[in-house]
Amino acid sequence: MPRPRKPRCCQAFAGDRVFKPRSIPMSQLETIRLELSELEALRLCDLERLDQDAAGAQMGVSRGTVQRLLKSGRAKVVDAILGSHALLIEKGESDEDLYSD
């Protein structure tokens, strides 16, 4: 039996939940799901310019977890952009809105 996932502290997200190409109806688009924890890791490391250790401390997870979140999040965002897919931001099972700026 796998170990339960550690809760991940994520900033409350109040932005748009779906990003899609213009002029294509949602019914015709493949949807890629981006977890809130992946978005938070991207925000902390790419936008706030924190290193992975500092981002992990802020999210309450290890540096290795942040590295995995960045790898999967970046791949999903690039796939959505290059493949003209819809990007749906949603709360994952271990994501918690524990703080907000």
Image (cartoon, rainbow, N blue to C red):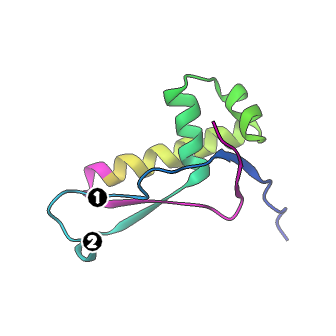
Q: Badge 2 local density, few (<14 within 10 Å), some, or many (20+)?
A: some
Q: Badge 1 local density, few (<14 within 10 Å), some, or many (20+)?
A: some
Q: Distance between the residues labelled 1 and 2?
A: 8 Å
Q: What residue type is labelled 1?
A: Lys
Q: What residue type is labelled 2?
A: Met
Instruction: Determine whether, in the image, residue 80 is placed left or right of residue 36.
Output: left
* Nearest to the observer: residue 100 or residue 52: 100
* Magenta residue check for 84: yes
Image: magenta residue range: 81-101
* Badge number at residue 97: none
* Nearest to the observer: residue 59 or residue 62: 59
Q: Residue at x 50, y 29 (%)?
A: 46
Q: What element carries label 1?
A: loop
* Nearest to the observer: residue 74 or residue 39: 39
Residue bearing mark 2:
26
- Reply above or below: 26 against 51: below
Q: Which residue is drawn at 53% across and 49% down?
A: 72
Residue bearing mark 1:
20
Q: Residue at x 64, y 23 (%)?
A: 51
- In contact (CB < 8 Å): disc 1 and disc 2: yes
Image coordinates for residue 41, horizontal then vertical, percent: 59, 39
Label located before the other in sequence (1 or 2): 1
- Which residue is farthest bottom? 27
* Magenta residue check for 56: no
Q: In which quarter of the image is residue 23?
A: bottom left
Quadrant containing the N terminus is bottom right
Image coordinates for residue 34, horizontal then vertical, percent: 49, 56
Q: Is mark 2 on a helix, strand or loop?
A: helix
